[in-house]
Image: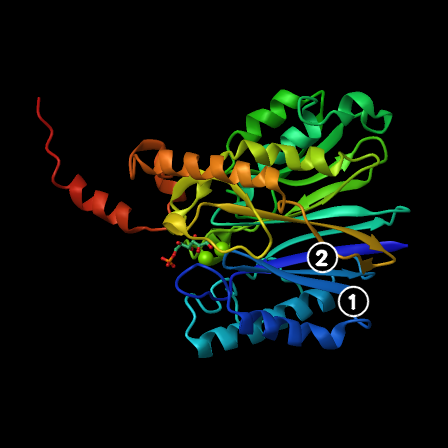
Amino acid sequence: MRVTLTAIKADIGSIGGHIRPSVSLLKEVERSLQPHLGSDFIDFRLSYTGDDIAILMTHTHGTDNPLIHQIAWDAFKAAADVAMKEGLYGAGQDLLKDAFSGNIRGLGPGIAEMEFEERKSEPFLLFAADKTDPGAFNLPLYLAFCDPMYCSGLLLSPNMFKGFKFEIMDVSYTGGDKVIALVAPEELYDIAALLRDPERYVIKAVYSRTTGEIAAVASTTRLHNIAGKYVGKDDPILLVRAQGSFPATGEILEPYALVPYVGGFMRGSHQGPLMPVKQNSSVSFFDGPPIVSCTAYCVKEGKLSEEADAFDHPFWDYVREIASKKAIELRRQGFYGNAMLPYGELEYGGIVERLKALEGKFEIRH
Ligand code: F6R
Ligand code: MG
Ligand code: MG
């Protein structure tokens, strides 16, 4: 059977700043989705990661389906009204346009969708991150799909010997989707040359070169490009299929033990280690650190299995401790150097005005 997975996330308001959504927000999203269950879509799940709510839907309508997008949009809109009534912080923040116009892309929420023929067993992972941006998935995806130091399947499994194709997007471009396709292993260095700049080049999708099938798809929304100014970080989501001709679940997870420094953290303007957390975790220290959750499922004829929280394991407690240490270490240097993002990526324009004012006070001495 051909099935479509649609994952859509948005920050529509949160408690006590940017910490987490309220239970009533989640209930409102659920209330709004429930009537469509079994008719417009086959199954759905709801979760949150920091202040972002993620809706996962399964259906047979393919990607970019107006009905599916509208259902998600309406659910977020209804919950944003609740957030407004509750006086939650940033109520409706990611819903940048007033009216729905057939596709949720370009309206604010982040979206990752893939359509495929279900395998006999179809395991997949839903990653959701908060206080960071879509480039946060660059390194983990690169390591899981290109590097035999992380993905032993590239050496051991004939299903993967041909490697993978990457679609990489230049998210600085505002005239449409500017995408390049590159293949690993032949173009590994080109791929790395782009991915080393995660604020600009972002993995949009990965495909198996053995079967041509889609392996992974990530949200690449830049709220900045939609609103014309920073209105919040583009906290991303990612869907990854596992096993068979794709990396094993554990190979996809392993790179997260690196806790790489990513852009985001406090005021969307700093760098911080990407901490793997359990599903439905809030943020805390310095409005962070940047967090990523991962829920594993199998899907059969569109029905989702029970979920397994991939980062809910004693191993990841140890990794979380490393992430805390890395966060404290970098925070020791406050605003200085690499602790803060470069000007173009700061969520606040205020510092630019400050520097403009100072510029006039400089004098040239010969
Ligand atoms: C991401 C997030 C941050 C905020 C940023 C600006 O979830 O919450 O990136 O967008 O801290 O916050 P405010 O709007 O409070 O200035
Ligand atoms: Mg937020
Ligand atoms: Mg967020």
Residue situated in front as seen by the camera: 312 or 125 = 312
Q: Residues within 10 Å of mark 1 (few under 14, many from 20)?
A: many
Q: Residue at x 41, y 43 (%)?
A: 345
Q: Residue at x 16, y 42 (%)?
A: 358
CB of mark 2 near ligand 3 (< 8 Å): no
234 with respect to 5 (left or right)? left
Q: Amino acid at mark 2?
A: Thr
Quadrant of residue 66 within the rendered picture: bottom right
| First in residue order: circle 1 vs circle 2 | 2
Instruction: Indicate the quadrant containing the C terminus: top left, top right, bottom left or bottom right.
Output: top left
Does dot 1 land on a helix, a strand or a loop?
A: loop
Q: Residue furthest bottom?
A: 85
Residue under pointer 2: 6
The image shows residue 23 at horizontal and vertical percentages of: 54, 70
Q: Quadrant of ligand 1?
A: bottom left
Does dot 2 land on a helix, a strand or a loop?
A: strand
Q: Which mark is residue 17?
A: none
The answer to the question of whether label 1 and label 2 lie on touching residues, with beta carbons closer than 8 A, is: yes
Q: Amino acid at mark 1?
A: Phe
In the image, is residue 121 above or below residue 57?
above
In the image, is residue 39 above or below residue 119?
below
CB of mark 1 near ligand 3 (< 8 Å): no
Q: Residues within 10 Å of mark 2 (few under 14, many from 20)?
A: many
The image shows residue 165 at horizontal and vertical percentages of: 73, 32
Visible in this render: residue 136? yes
Look at the image and name its color scheme: rainbow
Q: Residue at x 71, y 47 (%)?
A: 125
Visible in this render: residue 182? no
39 with respect to 277 (left or right)? right
Residue under pointer 1: 41
Residue situated in front as seen by the camera: 361 or 293 = 293
The image shows residue 315 at horizontal and vertical percentages of: 60, 37
